[in-house]
Structure formats: structure tokens, C-alpha cells
Image: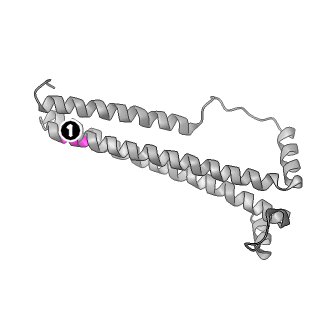
Amino acid sequence: MRESVKMAADQPATNDTSIEELTHDQLLALASVSLDLGERSADRLWSRFVQMLTVNAGLVALTTVATSSDLYLVGVFAGIVGLILSFIWVRIHVVSQFNEARYRADATFTIDSSPTLRHFLRARSADGPRIPRPTGRSATHYARGVIDLILVVWGIAVLVFLFAYLDIISL
């Protein structure tokens, strides 16, 4: 694969070059780059997800300390920070999914522009058995569900700590 990318780089296309004028090596290199960008976008998304979960775990520890010390405003603050952090991650998740879909569409368009590449990939996928996904949903769908759940939990935590601070309930 690297060799085809290198060969395509030896014959650079200009801004005036249409996709029909590109060689198979150049088309394959474009498709490869598009798929690689999509994969990197997904990797960054999961890295951010792990970081977000780590910070949320720290905030949960902070709320535990706040509960044991009757520092309910600290719990309210931690809950608000958790809500904001989770909402930001939801927005990042949406943008990341858009980027992954865009890169996948770019690769599909590039492959479809060459009858030879399109025929090769269709024949290749028809030869081998396609292993179906064990569930109907992707891993990012479940990650989004986890974040939605965390948002709900932080919302409840903010209300509980606020009510405890106002002496409406006791913890």
C-alpha cells in the first residue's frame, strides 16, 4: 500500500486535474488517505472518551468527599462541571461522526470513480464471507448512550446537592 502511495506521489495531480484523469495508483492513494483520516478521527474520539470518563471519575470522587464533609456546594459545582464536560463531549462526538462519514463518502466516491477499482472491490467482497456485526449497533452508539446516561446522572446529582444545600432534603 505504501508503495502505491509513493508511486502516486511521483506523479502529482494539479488543482486542475479532474478525478477522471487520475491513475489507478493515485485513486487508490486518495481512497487510502480518506480511510486513514476516518480511522484517525475515530481513534481521537475514543481517546477523548477515555479522558472524559477519567475526569468524570475524579468528579465522582469529589462529590463523595463533598457528601461526607457536608460541602454540598462543592457537589453542586462538581455536578455542573460534569454536565458541561459531558455536553462538550456529546458535541465532539457529533462532529467526529460527521467527519468519519465524510471521509468514508470521499473514499467511496474515489473508488466508484474507477470502474476497475469498483469491480475489484465488489468481486473481492463477494468472494469471502462477510461476518455480520454481533449487534445491530456500532461501538460509538453505545459510547453515546454512556454519555447520555452520565448527563442524566450529573443532572440528578446537581439537583440532589442543591436540595441538600438548601435543607430541602438530608443526605
Q: Is residue 20 above or below residue 140?
A: below
Residue 73 place in picture, x, y as percent = 16, 40
From the viewer's perspective, tell me whether residue 153 is left or right of residue 66.
Answer: right
Q: What secondary structure do most residues of the magenta stretch adopt?
A: helix
In the picture, residue 146 is in which quadrant?
top left
**Does residue 24 show up magenta in the picture?**
no
SS of the residue under disc 1: helix
Residue 38 place in picture, x, y as percent = 62, 53
The residue at 52%/53% (across/down) is: 44
Within 10 angstroms of label 1, few (less than 14), some, or many (20 or more) residues?
Answer: many
Quarter of the image with the N terminus is: bottom right
Q: Amino acid at mark 1?
A: Gly
The residue at 85%/54% (across/down) is: 117
Q: Nearer the viewer, residue 112 or 56?
A: 112
**Does residue 77 show up magenta in the picture?**
yes
Q: Is residue 20 above or below residue 119?
A: below
The residue under label 1 is: 75
The residue at 73%/61% (across/down) is: 30
Residue 77 place in picture, x, y as percent = 22, 43
The residue at 68%/50% (across/down) is: 104
Q: Which residues are magenta?
A: 74-78
Q: Nearer the viewer, residue 94 or 48?
A: 94
- Report if residue 111 is visible in the image: yes
